[in-house]
Every structure is written in structure tokens, then in C-alpha cells.
Amino acid sequence: MKAALVIDTGVVQIQDMAPPVPRNNEVVIKVVSAGVCGSDLHVFQGTHAFRKPPVILGHEVAGDVVEIGSDVTNFRIGDRVTVEPHKGCGTCEFCTQNLVNLCTGKSAPGTPGWIGTFVEYFNAPESSLHRLADSTSYDMGVLIEPLAVAVHVMERTSVRTRDGIAILGAGTIGLLTQVIAREMGFKTIITTDTAAFNREMSMRLGATLSLDPLVADVPARVLEITGGRGVDLAIVAAGADNILDQATACVRKRGEIGLVAMITKRIPFYSYGIVFNEQTVYGAMTYETRDFTKAADMINGGLDLSALVTHKFELERSQEALDILSQKKANVVKVLVTM
């Protein structure tokens, strides 16, 4: 089968390799569609914390079950599925609390022992599979995984009021977080992004206001819109040097700041506002199974996110898929790779 690997910084190569053989508890999926994630971009740019070349790209996937292991009981050949792409050790304190996302011994696609999803055939444990409704396209099936990230960062908040939220960064995760914020009842939704196309997309999805942080004084505008109070919650979904300071300046006293962006460089942070305003900062690492299930239910229930899919490339053009996202060569939000 063919597979797309990052073999060096900025270089993707298509290689031939043997297709996976399922273990007793696994299925093999014929991949139809896979998504390019920000973590793939980190691998491509050489900034990922632990995935280093050579590595097969991808962890977002949708396709058809074509082979099943001897112990698989709940899925059949022909089932249309997506995959919750992490496996825990099963015994640590986090796994026993259903927090596989925090398992220190977990494995994920594109790490040793598990191939990535930019392949023609992909193996996955039965326990990680989620069915796609007959009405759910494979492209929408791929978006279940990033939607689960957005569900998780929003489920982590403990703020009780839903007057206002600021989402700093309107890329794929920021826009999906906006969708969840709307679903959770936030009345005023303010987003930021340096790309005009992303700001326009945010407004199409129902934002109250979307600002260019290179031009606007974001905290001043947020305070203006909220009558000087600030928003209840700020979600950091991008990695600009001043973004944490922006977040604290936007949030009300005893408000919260959620970090979902995987910022891999050191950035300055003026922490006085956290103390002075008794704000709470929390992180959100991928998702719990319940978050993934909620995301699957939303998309299988008819949530249409097709507007976010701006580009599709065949597997052989994976280099272009990474280039266009890395260099922002066009109006781009979500890029898919198809087999």
C-alpha cells in the first residue's frame, strides 16, 4: 500500500509498504478520507514535541472496515467508521478514570507501533471505533476528531455564566470551538485571527465579532462590547507571542482561560492579571471518550461542517496539502487527503 511520510523538515514522500495485519482485537480500515491536523503541521515543520521524521502523517480518518480480527464482535466488514485515535495502557491512574488522553504510556497514530492515517489501509482496535450514520459523509466523519477537541476544551470549563467568550485563533479548532460555544449557549462570541478568510468564516458561523489582532486592540474591543466587564471565558487556540497576555486582559474577574493550542515555543507571559483578577487557567489535551462520542453524535445527528473543508488532495499530493496549510498559500481552513 501507499503511505505519506515526513522524511525531513518540510519534505513529504510517498512510499510503498506492507498493509497492516489486524491483531485479534483490531480491524483494518480501507481509508477514504484523512485530515491534516495542526500536529501534522508541527511534524512537517520539525517542531513537534515527540514525533520526529521519518513518520507517517495523520490521525484523523474515516473509511470502511475491510478485515476483522478473531475477537472483534461489534463490527462487521463493510461498516463505515471513524477512529478515536489513542490507546491507553489500561492500568495507570488516568486510564482507570477513563482519561486515556492523559495516559503516560498511550500510543497514537504515527508513533512507534501504530501507523499514521495517510495510508490506504489503517488498523485500529475495536474499542476505538465509532460508526458513521448512513447520512454522514466520510469528510464529515473525519471532522469528528477535531470537533471532539473542541468539545473537550469547552467541557473543561467550570464557569457558570454564559454571557461572553473570546476565542483567540480562528483556525479549525478555534472555529469548531465556536460551534460548541454556540451550542452551549454563550451569548456573545468574539473571535480573532490574522487571516481575513478565517474571520469571515467565523462570522458566517455566527460570531458576534471577529477581530484582526494585528490591527485591533483586542482586549479594549472585548471590554467595550462587554460593558467593561470582560468575557467569562477565553480559549487560546493560536500561538502568538502575546496571546496569553491578550487572554488574561479579555477575561473578567474570576473568569477562566482555556489553552488548547499546542504552543511548542517559549513565549512571554505577564501573570499579574491572573493573580489580581483571580482568574483560572486550564489546559485541554485532546479529548476523553465521552467527548469523542458527543462529537460523533452531533455530526451523525446532522451538524453540517462542510464549509470548513476548503481543500482536498489525493494521497500522492500530500506535500501540497502540508505546504498550503503551512504557508497559507490560499484561503484555507481544513485540508483533507483522500485515497
Image (tube, helix red, strand yellow):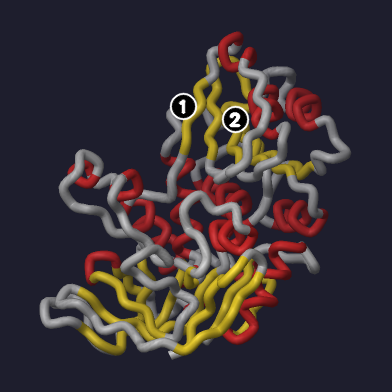
Dot 2 amino acid type? Asp
Side (left or right) of 201 relative to 145:
right
x then y, percent, for residue 106 = 30, 54
- Which residue of the protein is positioned furthest toward the left in this rendering? 71
Side (left or right) of 152 relative to 175:
left
Which is nearer the eye, 107 or 209?
Answer: 107
Q: Quadrant of the N terminus?
A: bottom left
Q: Helix, strand or loop at disc 2?
A: loop
Residue at image mark 2: 163
**Residue drawn at the location 43% of the way across and 45% of the way down:** 285
Quarter holding residue 235: top right
- Which residue of the protein is positioned furthest toward the right in this rendering? 215
x then y, percent, for residue 236 = 61, 39
Which is nearer the eye, 83 or 147?
Answer: 83
Crowding at dot 2, Cα within 10 Å, few <14 / some 14-19 / many 20+, comes out as some
Q: Helix, strand or loop at disc 1?
A: loop
Side (left or right) of 273 relative to 33:
right
Dot 1 amino acid type? Arg
Check the image and report above or below for 90 versus 258.
Answer: below
Crowding at dot 1, Cα within 10 Å, few <14 / some 14-19 / many 20+, comes out as few
**Residue drawn at the location 60% of the way across and 9% of the way down:** 276
**Residue drawn at the location 59% of the way across and 30% of the way down:** 163
Check the image and report above or below for 149 versus 72.
Answer: above
- Which residue of the protein is positioned furthest toward the top in this rendering? 276
**Residue drawn at the location 75% of the way across and 27% of the way down:** 219
Which is nearer the eye, 223 or 302?
Answer: 223
| Distance from the alpha carbon under mark 1 to that under mark 2 | 9 Å
x then y, percent, for residue 193 = 75, 47
Residue at image mark 1: 160
Check the image and report above or below for 128 versus 287.
Answer: below
